[in-house]
Image (cartoon, grey):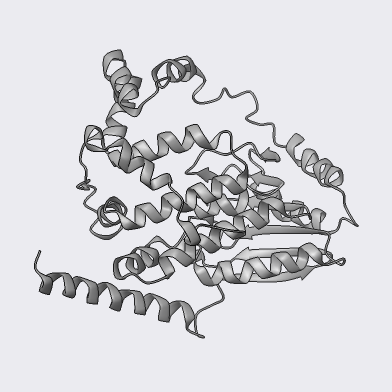
């Protein structure tokens, strides 16, 4: 690619980034997050329903200081976070803005993830009960805003794009969408509640949501296959197991994995292995290193192009095969960033 073409691409990316940032900072744009005190509860409402409450940097910079203020405020007993619009809690981070920033070397590409993970840590360590009402689509950054807190409430409309981690108490609900406002009011009306008091309220609603309690776990019939097929010391071993098995289930998993970035598959595999033994803070440091490594590479931008921009669903990964992804390149992605590492 010629220097002229590269310069043109950078200019287009810079112009798109400036438009995005200008839109984000415009006084005519409705507030992306609403922060209010209701009784003795601090209430965070993610307020970008037109984009499924996607999380951006201005929202993070509003939520973090307010959360810390409420945590130290003797007049605040608990914190509730929810999404506006009825379709989504939060559909993830504003990837388009981060992508355009990464292309032109704008610090937003570093600042967004750094400040997002610092917020996630603040949620995970918050001394006040933190209750996430996870109604609707919840992906990426939305998972970070919810699962790290002490209490999570899901409805029949909750759709996660990541597996949930076992941190604190999770209250899964079926057919209780209409009861969420009632639940929120009851939580807000609690007087100086302990964690046990909040648990009792949530358990009351959980006991009302047993309509689907007899339905088996959707993957129950596949659990033995999952344990057998995915028990390997490498991604290549997993792929080999799936191809050798020949069952429809195995074929489907192999087909899905074949469409993914080979680099991302290897990074994710090692990340899962190492993350199981780490604290939340150590996991966030690892995640930040990996995020910055992906921003330095090619596949992140190619994936965004194929899925969100051109929408041709045909990414051209580099390297294109698992065998071409060296252990050295994987190791580099997990290495310390020195003075640019994530700190709390």
Instruction: Answer with left or right where residue 78 lies relative to residue 145.
Output: right
Pinpoint residue 82: horizontal percent, then vertical percent. 64, 58
Q: Looking at the image, which residue is at 49% across and 19% down?
A: 223
Pinpoint residue 5: horizontal percent, then vertical percent. 12, 71
4 versus 169 height, above or below:
below
Q: 338 or 183: which is nearer to us?
A: 338
Q: Looking at the image, which residue is at 66% across and 40% down?
A: 167
Q: 39 or 99: which is nearer to us?
A: 99
167 versus 190 height, above or below:
above
Q: 4 or 138: which is nearer to us?
A: 4
Q: Residue 296: which quarter of the image?
A: bottom left
Q: From this viewpoint, is residue 136 visible? A: no
Pinpoint residue 275: horizontal percent, then vertical percent. 53, 37
Q: Looking at the image, which residue is at 73% across and 53% down?
A: 130
Q: Quadrant of the N terminus?
A: bottom left
* Residue furthest out toward the right: 191
Q: Quadrant of the C terminus?
A: bottom right
């Amino acid at each position: 690619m010629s220097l002229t073409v590269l310069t043109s691409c950078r200019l287009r990316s810079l112009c798109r980034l400036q438009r995005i940032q200008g839109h984000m900072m415009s006084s005519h744009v409705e507030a992306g997050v609403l922060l209010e005190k209701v009784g003795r509860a601090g209430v965070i409402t993610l307020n970008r329903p037109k984009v499924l409450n996607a999380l951006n940097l201005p929202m993070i910079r509003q939520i973090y200081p307010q959360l810390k203020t409420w945590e130290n405020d003797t007049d605040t007993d608990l914190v509730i976070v929810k999404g506006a619009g009825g379709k989504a809690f939060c559909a993830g981070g504003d990837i388009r803005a981060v992508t355009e920033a990464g292309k032109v070397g704008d610090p937003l590409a570093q600042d967004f993830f750094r400040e997002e993970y610092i917020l996630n840590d603040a949620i995970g360590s918050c001394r006040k009960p933190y209750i996430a009402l996870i109604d609707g689509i919840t992906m990426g950054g939305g998972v970070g805003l919810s699962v790290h807190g002490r209490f999570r409430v899901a409805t029949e409309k909750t759709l996660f794009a990541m597996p949930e981690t076992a941190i604190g108490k999770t209250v899964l609900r079926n057919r209780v969408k209409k009861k969420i406002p009632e639940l929120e009011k009851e939580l807000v009306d609690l007087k100086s509640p302990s964690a046990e008091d909040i648990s009792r309220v949530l358990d009351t609603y959980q006991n009302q949501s047993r309509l689907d309690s007899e339905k088996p776990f959707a993957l129950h019939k596949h659990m033995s296959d999952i344990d057998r097929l995915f028990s390997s010391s490498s991604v290549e071993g997993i792929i080999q197991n799936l191809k050798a098995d020949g069952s429809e289930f195995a074929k489907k998993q192999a087909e899905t994995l074949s469409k993914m970035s080979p680099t991302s598959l290897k990074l994710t595999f090692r990340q899962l292995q190492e993350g199981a033994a780490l604290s939340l803070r150590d996991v966030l440091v690892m995640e930040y290193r990996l995020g910055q490594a992906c921003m330095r590479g090619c596949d992140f931008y190619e994936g965004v192009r194929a899925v969100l921009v051109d929408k041709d669903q045909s990414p051209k990964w580099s390297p294109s095969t698992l065998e071409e992804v060296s252990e050295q390149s994987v190791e580099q992605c997990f290495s310390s960033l020195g003075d640019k590492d994530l700190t709390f």
